[in-house]
Amino acid sequence: MCGIVGIYTDKGPVDPAVLEAMRDTLGHRGPDDAGIEVWPEYGVGLGHRRLSIIDLSPGGHQPMSNEDGTVWTVYNGEIYNFREIRRQLEERGHSFRSQSDTEVIVHAYEEWGDDCVHRFSGMFAYAIWDTTRRRLVLVRDRLGIKPLVYYWDGRLFIFASEIKAILAHPHTDRSVDRSALFDYLTYSYVPPPKTAYSKIRKLPAAHLLVFDGVTTSVHEYWDVDLDGQTGIRTSDEAVEAISGELANAVRRHMVSDVPVGVFLSGGIDSGTVTALAAKSSNESLRTFTIDFDDPAASEGAFAQLTADRYGTRHYRRVAVRDSVGVMLARTVAMYDEPFGDSSAIPTYQVAVLGSEHVKVALSGDGGDELFAGYQRYQLWMDQQWARWVPRSIARPLLAPILAVLPHHWAPARKAEKLGLEHAERYWRLVSMFSPSQKRAIVGPEWVREFEGYDDFWYFRQYTRPSLDPITMAQYLDLKTYLPEDILTKVDRASMAVSLEVRPPLLDHTLVELTFQVPSRLRWPGGQLKHLLRQAARPWLPAEILSGSKKGFGVPWSSWMRSGNGWRTEFLAQGSGRELGLLSGPVGRPDGHQGMDMQSWQLLVLEQWLRRQGEEALAPSAASTPRR
């Protein structure tokens, strides 16, 4: 796991001192080694910070090249099948100087060009500098586990693992994309390809970018095959196939030259990973739990059951209640742009605990998307009755009634769904502020600027109405919420303390298999995680298999009760008000004044705004709404 950065400029040679300064903003991602290479004749430079996991010798130093120095790479991640690919390349005459998976990338590119990515199984973000063809190639892994952002203003091109490295360049345009902030209120994160900055873009998951010094070309190289046929017809066949692939996925993710631990909650996802990792490990496995002193949120006892069953060296720590101000400052520093998922707080704390004992930890991320584990899936499926009420009839009949009913009244919310398009009912389940709620809290200037704006453009991009309802919801979450919320959260929180986190449940082979199991077997009778529960039956205690999902969020009611006054003052007198972004009430729509998820999202936005200059936040052509 590492941090990468690179520069192309047509203004002359890259300044090594500038490149080093940018690289070293990523020191937390790679404290073990650092390197740069520059090509003055081309105006190109590459930088790297290394966290040594595979091949701990100097042979793993980056930037790394092929034998004749015509192909170079900087790389962040792990390729789990690198030994298999290396054997294929050696049979084709390639010579290797190290035992690193990094070196496989340069030779695979030599042999297969851009298509080499299809041969890689793992999590990765890498850049190739092809000196012969004078092109940069950027690639992000299939599920979006590792991040990659880039900047292009017509003369200066920069890529990096995190936004902070790009902002460290003295000549980058730091103007803010106002539409990205407007989107943040919907999604609780800034959806790709946007970032909070107009000139900085995210490379989406499963995408490849080619930069030739003049233009950027981006295309998607992988997607889940929703039409594939596995031949699975019965529940027993599905469980057998899933069980086998789960074991294979965890075994692949154990490849490492340093000890590997596991983030262990009291749930099925991390319990399954722990069970299979313990079976694959030659030594006692280390497991890590962050627990809460609130009984309603605590899963420590369930985590201990799994730890005891597999004899792990289990470390448990009760989450620390930092002040709201401290948590806000840390969140904004880690994520570089507004990021509103409050579970980043305990995620950071379990990463701190893990980093005290190991350099690599497995997680159970992806289990909810893959095996239908979110409780909102049950809500969504319960709403399917609304599909049969024509919108053309429902909307005109409901409009005058809804106009006089309190929005927060449950019957009013249920009736409102009749006037929505089918997919929007799910979009609203997974969004933070509805379109009307957003326009009630932003200032009139922002309301006018975004008149007619498609608040759900990002969800719309990945919605497949032809799919059955549960598959449609799972696929949408896999392509949006998973990479841009869950995996972003884990990457920044873990790499902030130099810890590599690997999610075996997101092995792309397992993902492809699971989505090709018929939905009637994935969702029989509305049971959450049915397939995983059946597959894990031989591995986990019965109490965990029958337990209900608690999630991994902060227990706000007990944590934040004393912070309400501070919150109100912080939002009422801040940059959001001064800039006209926030003008309406900041409490929940039902009038509840306690700390809630919407309030946290607004606090994060306000904290981020205070770090920006007024000039950067002014309206500009670069920040006009993108639909």
Image (cartoon, rainbow, N blue to C red):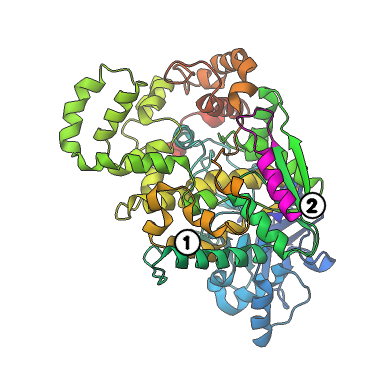
x and y, in percent, of residue 583 in the image: 45, 17
* Residue at the spot of label 1: 514
Res 45 quadrant in image: bottom right
> Looking at the picture, which amino acid does disc 2 mark?
Val
Relative vertical location of residue 224 with respect to residue 350 in this rendering, above or below: below
Q: Pick the quarter of the image with the C terminus.
A: top left
Between 315 and 326, the one nearer to me in the picture: 315
Q: Helix, strand or loop at disc 2?
A: loop
Q: Residue at x 71, y 55 (%)?
A: 2
x and y, in percent, of residue 132 in the image: 62, 74
On the rendered structure, is 16 left or right of 171?
right
Q: Helix, strand or loop at disc 1?
A: helix
Q: Pick the quarter of the image with the N terminus.
A: bottom right
- Give yes or no for contact between labels 1 and 2 (Cβ–Cβ under 8 Å): no
On the rendered structure, is 421 left or right of 564?
left
Q: CA distance from mark 1 to mark 2?
A: 31 Å
Q: Residue at x 71, y 47 (%)?
A: 495
Relative vertical location of residue 496 with respect to residue 41 in this rendering, above or below: above
Which region is colored magenta?
Answer: 291-311
Residue 313 seen anywhere in this rendered image of the structure: yes
| Pointer 2 local density, CA inside 10 Å: few below 14, some 14–19, many at least 20 | some
x and y, in percent, of residue 532 in the image: 53, 55
Observer-side mark, 1 or 2, equals 1
Q: Residue at x 69, y 60 (%)?
A: 277
Between 379 and 33, the one nearer to me in the picture: 379
Relative vertical location of residue 85 with respect to residue 2 in this rendering, above or below: below
* Residue at the spot of label 2: 358
